[in-house]
Image: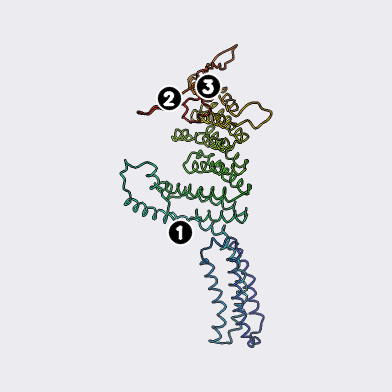
Amino acid sequence: MKTLAKMSLFVPFILLSIFLLCKVDVSDLEKYINSFISISLTLATFSISFSFLQYQFSPYKSLLKSVSRRQLNYSYLTIVLALLPLFILFLNKDFVPILSLLVIPILAYMLIFLLVVSAEESNPQYLLINKVKNRNLTRFLKEYEKEKKIQLDELKELEFSKVDETPMHDYRKSKYNNIIIKNNPFDFINEIVAISIINSDADKFESTIKTFLILVDKTISHELVKNSDFRFTIYKLISNSFERLVITISEQSANKTIQNRFLENIGTYLKQKALKCEQTNEVYLNMTGLLTIFAVKILEKGNRDGALFVVSLNRQLAQKGIYDPPKDSQDSFFKLELPFYPTQIMTIGQKAVELKNSDFLYRCLEELGYLGCTAIKYDHYQVGIECLQSLVQLGREARANNVKCFWRHCMLESIDHADERIWWMLSWVTHLEEKSRKQWIESFETAYSRLRGYKRKIEYVEKNGNYGFQFTDSKEPYTESFSKEQYMRKVDYSDIKETKEFKLY
């Protein structure tokens, strides 16, 4: 309840007090002094008792580590008001009726007011809004930064390896190690989500997810975070918090509606970031990667629609980046990060192969095919080559795992559908300039050869004024060799059980 509403509710009671004082003959009430004192104490007792019962009946009472200071302060005020007639009795009993007529309506109001306060203090959304207020968020970030510096200083004393003799993953682990801190709003959000799922409280669940996204924005844009190295620690905090959400929602909830509402909220949020060309920022890439984990988990549990939503989201975020790249100097980094999205589609598709879910695999191939065509049309090599890589890998893994096409009217296999989508992409190469076309043709030769297992040459030809491609297939098994220092490895792509993935150029 808003402050203005609470104040408005108080007005009738104070008016009642004034009315009683003006209309009642106080001299006639002296014989009721004992009753006045009893009524005041009784009202105070019920007001405080009923308000504390609110906590006991709240499904979110496990969030409350103790009774709120606000609740205690108003309870103390109620006790003081109730005791005023008793105190006055020892000073001058003639004033007890006057004071009681003033206090009793106010105590009646406190009965309602304390219930409202306890309802708010046991409402997770109310508590969460307070935690994400600017002053509280600033206080949390300052405390977090302080504790992080203390932790890093302590860790330095326990570093026993030289920098050049430490694996990179160990270095990053110590640098971004998390800490536990009181009043962490990210931890509080995870607690609310877990309880709301158990209670099937869809409204609280969705509002909490929306508040989490607001918190992410406020944290990233905060002055303490925006222009300092501390931001990397906060990015990790956000990613870890989101990962906990993903695990909680995917493992605790058998409710597909809740899972899909979560995805819709996150998907809308990431699309809004893409409108500002921010989909390749570290935080949002991490969130998308964790959505891939989420999609894999819910696909195992039969939530096809939710998993397909994630696949489609990856395609759309990549396509938006191709259509509207940033205009500033970060364009080159943006291009290098954009291929992250088709790799996520491939990861989910690989799970479909493992589950022998040819229907879902077909959808993944479809998404990669459309995204790949977009990349060719705009001559976006980074995304296009990753789509080729993914189509080839999914096709080879589907063949190795004997994944058949789901549609009984179709004689093709899953690997053939991968081949189809590669052809879709190749058909758009005719619209490119000669230099780009040659580069793409070489990549398509490699892609086809890996997928088929035998060498394929592609020629760009003209026939009757129309331009197209001519294939020359060989019966020679297609192999690729890799060497590094004294090590050598040869991959025979004609072996259908060979599913080694090697970077395609």
Label 2: few (<14), some (14–19) or many (≥20) C-alpha neighbours in 10 Å:
few
Label 2 residue SS: strand
Label 1: few (<14), some (14–19) or many (≥20) C-alpha neighbours in 10 Å:
few
Q: Nearer the viewer, residue 157 or 438?
A: 157
Does residue 342 lie above or below 493 as drawn? below
Residue 368 position, x and y percent, is 56, 31
Give the tally of numbered discs.
Answer: 3
- Residue with the most extreme top position: 464
**Is label 2 or label 3 in front?**
2
Q: Name the residue rendered at 50%, 25% in the picture.
A: 493
Label 1 residue SS: loop
Q: Nearer the viewer, residue 268 or 299?
A: 299
Label 3: few (<14), some (14–19) or many (≥20) C-alpha neighbours in 10 Å:
some
- Name which of mark 1 and mark 3 comes first in the sequence: 1
Disc assigned to residue 432: 3
Does residue 211 lie above or below 288 as drawn? below
Does residue 269 lie above or below 19 as drawn? above
Q: Alpha carbon of mark 1 to alpha carbon of mark 2: how far?
A: 55 Å
Q: Alpha carbon of mark 2 to alpha carbon of mark 3: how far?
A: 31 Å
Q: Name the residue rendered at 62%, 49% in the picture.
A: 254
Q: Nearer the viewer, residue 7 or 50?
A: 50
Q: Quadrant of the N terminus?
A: bottom right
- Residue with the most extreme right position: 409
Q: Name the residue rendered at 51%, 57% in the picture.
A: 131
Callouts 2 and 3 close, C-beta under 8 Å: no
Residue 441 position, x and y percent, is 51, 21
Question: To which quarter of the image does residue 410 belong?
Answer: top right
The amino acid at mark 3 is Leu
Residue under label 1, please give it. 182
Residue under label 2, please give it. 481
Q: Alpha carbon of mark 1 to alpha carbon of mark 3: how far?
A: 58 Å
